[in-house]
Amino acid sequence: MSPFDSIGNTSVLLNGIGTMNKLLTLESVTAHRENIHALDLCTFTEVEDRAIALLSKLKRYLNLSGLTALTDTTAELLATHHGILELGGLTSLSPAAAAALARMNGGLWLNGLTDLPVAIAEALAFHKGDLYLRGLPMLTDAAAAALAKHEGFLSLSGITTLTEAAAKSLAKHPQCAGLRK
């Protein structure tokens, strides 16, 4: 295999350290539009913004958990999606990307986040749909206070450590799940 080969409608790029990057292209999405899940979207590590623009129009569950990074531009495009969006491969977000994703209609699954800075929590608190943050082992008091303002179901089942102040803030959220009493 050369450093850049095409397998069907999927571009594959070897990144030089022995792992494979799979690029989701507009051509791949167009070719599989009638059965988009045949592409196994969660296996793609990179996406073209043109492909995201088309995917975002589909009112379906989109599992893009293979992505480990998200540009602010890509987040803006994903914000137009109506349905569940799973981005479990992301371990961090920029404040701009978080604000963009918060505008989307539907469930937002960010279970790969392992830390939630206050700016990100404040941005995500504006999301009106279900919000899954199951990868967080703890929350600061300020991040918990911000998330307590979220309207919609909130899953924090990965939390193992909370201060009393953080617990009191989250107790005010009417649909917060996953915290052990």
Image: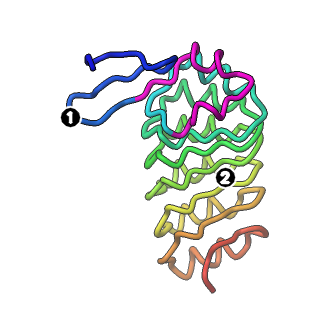
Q: Which one is earlier in the sequence, the residue at label 1 or at label 2?
A: 1
- Left or right: 66, with 155 as reference point: left
Query: Foreground: 33 or 131?
Result: 33
Q: In the displayed image of the protein, which residue is found farthest to the top?
A: 27
Dot 2 alpha-carbon crowd within 10 angstroms: few under 14, some 14 to 19, many 20 or more = many
Report which quarter residue 7 is drawn in.
Answer: top left
Q: Would you name the residue on which mark 1 appears?
A: 17
- Name the amino acid, label 2: Ala
The label shown at residue 125 is: 2
Rendered location of residue 177, percent (x, y)? 69, 71
Rendered location of residue 71, percent (x, y)? 48, 29
Give the alpha-carbon distance from disc 1 to disc 2, as whole Å. Answer: 38 Å
Q: Quadrant of the N terminus?
A: top left
Query: Foreground: 105 or 40?
Result: 40
**How many numbered discs?**
2
Q: In the displayed image of the protein, which residue is found farthest to the left?
A: 17
Rendered location of residue 168, percent (x, y)? 64, 78
Residue at 32% of width from left, 16% of height from top?
4
**Is residue 30 in the magenta section?**
yes
Residue 65 position (above or below residue 161)? above
Q: Secondary structure at mark 2?
A: loop
Rendered location of residue 73, percent (x, y)? 54, 24
Magenta stretch: give its range.
Answer: 22-42
